[in-house]
Image: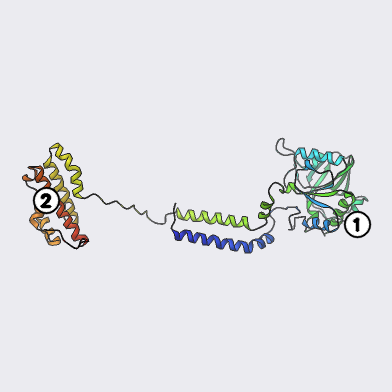
Amino acid sequence: MKGSRREWIVLAALVVVMAGVSALLGDRDAEDAREVRPDPSTYNAKGSGIKGLYLWLQELGLPVRRWERPLTDLPAQATVLLVLGPRIPLEDRELKALEEWIRGGGVLLLADDTVGGPVPGVWAGAPVLRFGLQPRIGERAGALRPAFPSPYATGVQTIQPTGRVRFQRQRPEGWAPLFADRAGDVLAIQRLGKGSIIALTDPGIFSNARLEVAGHARLALNITRDHVERGVVLVDEFHHGHGHESTFLRYLKTTAVPWMLAQVALAFLAFMLARGTRFGPPIPAGEEARTSSLEYVGALGDLYRRAGARRLAGDTLAKSFRRTLTEVLGARPGEQSAKLGARAARRFGVRAERVKACLDPGPGMAGSDEALLKYAQAVHQLEARVRHRISGPSRDGGDRPR
């Protein structure tokens, strides 16, 4: 489908304008837009992100790093791992690797509000299930105080969870509920080998919007600072979609480029639909000019000559000439030859007798090939004269002889 140059210029100008508007407003719109789904990532500076926690711990001098690889590849220097609200489910092999890592002395802070059991071959289920906790939906609670003294609760008067998920202990041995209500545990601790696992039902406690609420920031500091020692604190980003793509693609997601590409695609689709929609009756294709009577006679004359049908050829040519003259003059199909000749003489300035002779050829026309050819030439000259009078003088300015 080919459009005119003007249409393509209009489309190009539209794309340029849309791209300019997106470049000017894209960043602002991205910052001001409401989050459709919480994203507790250190790259997210919005309300549900944990970029504030990440930068704050770094400013305090703690060795905090982002981890953008599978949890099966944890380095030896990792002593504390924060897995906060993973958006991509943890695989079963990762959970096995985590359990071995904890038993070796690692400390895992797993904040997850996922509810649901495993689906074999599809989903491993809520990560805390592997460690003997069953997440269930409970009631919303207000501020919660520590259930017992703990180094993690030092300086923490209360926490204020907003989620409804609570942990039920399937294997009570080893689990200590630090914050809980009558619906279940909100934060529970378990020693596992040389390490510990801290399970939290509300990842939003450490979000940018709620880090300064109650004792949330002090709770995060106590967990990380008490166990980092000479190692590093890793924050899982692999299960937030980072590490699966290049840095350049991740950068593009933070700009207006995806929005610009979407606008370009919509504009192109609208253009193609408009080009393919007819808003009026179809325009018929132009017909090619038909061959002249002389060419017609030349094509069929040889066939008639070979068949010895000179009379048939002459009659066919006379009928064709009559039909042409009748259409040009607007006469009735059965008009007499004499009347047609008289009307042609008045309109085109030709002799009426000559026209009548071409319309009603005598028997001598079919007497020989020479006579038939002479008759065909006479008909062709009259047709040329008629066309000349209708369309105007010829290019050389002359008229054919009468």
Q: Which residue is mark 2?
A: 359
Quadrant for the C terminus in the image: bottom left
The label nearer to you, 1 versus 2, is 2
Q: Residues within 10 Å of mark 2 (few under 14, many from 20)?
A: many
Q: Write the residue at 58% across / 61% down.
A: 19
- Residue type at mark 1? Gly
Residue 61 seen:
yes
Label at residue 155: 1
Q: Write the residue at 72% across / 37% down.
A: 119
- Determine whether the residue tagged by mark 2 lies in a helix, strand or loop: helix
- Residue type at mark 2? Leu
In screen coordinates, is 237 left or right of 396? right
**Does 251 appear above or below 177?**
below
In screen coordinates, is 9 left or right of 23? left
- Nearest the viewer among 30 and 56 is 56
- Determine whether the residue tagged by mark 1 lies in a helix, strand or loop: loop
Image location (x, y in percent) of residue 252? 66, 55
- Nearest the viewer among 289 and 96 is 289
Residue 131 seen:
no
Of mark 1 and mark 2, the one earlier in the sequence is 1
Image location (x, y in percent) of residue 24? 63, 64
In screen coordinates, is 251 left or right of 354? right
Q: Write the residue at 49% across / 61% down.
A: 10
Cα–Cα gap, marks 1 and 2: 121 Å
**Does 155 appear above or below 312?**
below
